[in-house]
Image (tube, grey):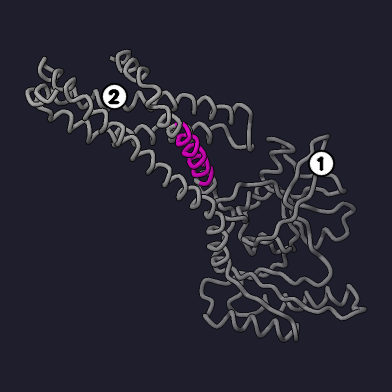
Amino acid sequence: MLQHLLTLIWNKKRQHFLLFLELFVSFLVLFAVFTMLVYNYGNLRTPRGFEYRRVLSVTASLQVPEGASKDSLTQLSEQLKRSLRNMPGVAAVSYVSSNSPYTLSSSSDNLSYDNISVQAESYWADDDFAKTLQAELLRGRWYNKQDVAATRRPVVINEKLAEKFFGAADPVGRVLSGNRQIVGVVRNLKDKGDYAEMIPGIYQRIDSGFQDKFLIKLTAGAAPSTESQIYKTIMHHLPGSSTEIEKLEDKRVVKNRLALVPVVLMLVISGFLVLNVALGIYGVVWYSVNKRRGELGLRKAVGATAGGITRQIVGEALVLTSLPLLLGIILAVQFPLLHLFDLPATTYIAAILLAAVFLYVLVSFCALYPGRQAAKIYPAVALHED
């Protein structure tokens, strides 16, 4: 049966060339779409690693007076933090760098250890960062004021960076490039959005100077007026400053929407392409059925069942799809083999399978109605027309 279907399709290869090309391109587009979807879904399933609810992101830009000493600016930051921390409804306060959770800012640093070099996201935060975001320490401790007199700069790294440098070994106590000594390992923080990939990260201690960005963790029973009280406290300590207060929950929504923009665009483009392919397959199968009414009527006259006729029509469409699909799979398999775009091989394999299944289901659906219409052909009428 399969050989017969292949012979029928091969004899009409010129007629089906454009459809072959459409199916081939459709598979590649579906492969790209499913790769993106599988990649984003995999990232979505990974644990977030921190708590963003009831956390405020505050930016208080201040025109620093010319000639102001570093010690005076440090004292100003400490006074503001102390006042905020003592407010009712405030659980913790932490100064952070501009690439804090869910911002569009990024800061990278090239780290090395034992001839291994890794590009990592570099964060600066004070001693209360882990407490503010409820980040979980897996090994060691978070840096604190006792590290001020340390001869080496204390740093905390995340799981991803620890895995890159040390595998399963304990990294606490090791010294990275730049005289940075690891004092702890924190669980990966998915702070670039729910659909972002976990990347290596290093946290370094902020201990001096004026800090204009900080996170405030509110208690569960914080009053609705707490945010306005925070604003008044900041303006009291920093008169004339430009202060902006945002909720991490809102910043998370914005960040996730930006991450989904290319996915939505790909879905819209592939949707139009799939619709054109579906109409093309339906038209080809319908035309084929009407042109072969005599042949199909003869088949029924010699004993073919209605189900057999339907399966034949659908089978021809599936075999027609298999040829360009095979070429597409050969091309798609090169992505995991050549490690293109540095994605896991499982992501590509899952995308290939999903794209192939989707295309087969689509073709089966498009060929089913013409196949049922072919099954209703009466042998006498068909032979008389022929």
Measuring from the top left, give residue 161's x and y in whole percent: 71, 43
Q: Which mark is residue 112?
A: 1
Report the side of 260 relative to 323 (left or right): right
Closer to the chain start, of discs 2 and 1, is 1
Dominant secondary structure, magenta: helix
Above or below for 202 versus 163: below
Q: Residues within 10 Å of mark 1 (few under 14, many from 20)?
A: some
Range shown magenta: 24-40
Residue 315, which numbered label? 2
Q: Residue at x 19, y 24 (%)?
A: 309
For the residue marked with disc 1, what is the amino acid?
A: Ser
Using the rendered view, name the quadrant where residue 324 is placed. Answer: top left
Secondary structure, mark 2, is helix
Does the magenta portion include 236? no
Between 207 and 281, the one nearer to me in the picture? 281
Q: Is residue 71 left or right of residue 122?
A: right
What's the residue type where badge 2 is placed? Gly
In the displayed structure image, the side of residue 6 where residue 327 appears, left or right: right
Tell me where residue 154 appears, x and y as whole percent: 81, 53
Q: Nearer the viewer, residue 260 or 285?
A: 285
* Location of residue 15 with respect to 195 vertically, above or below: above
Question: Where's residue 138, x and y in %?
Answer: 65, 47
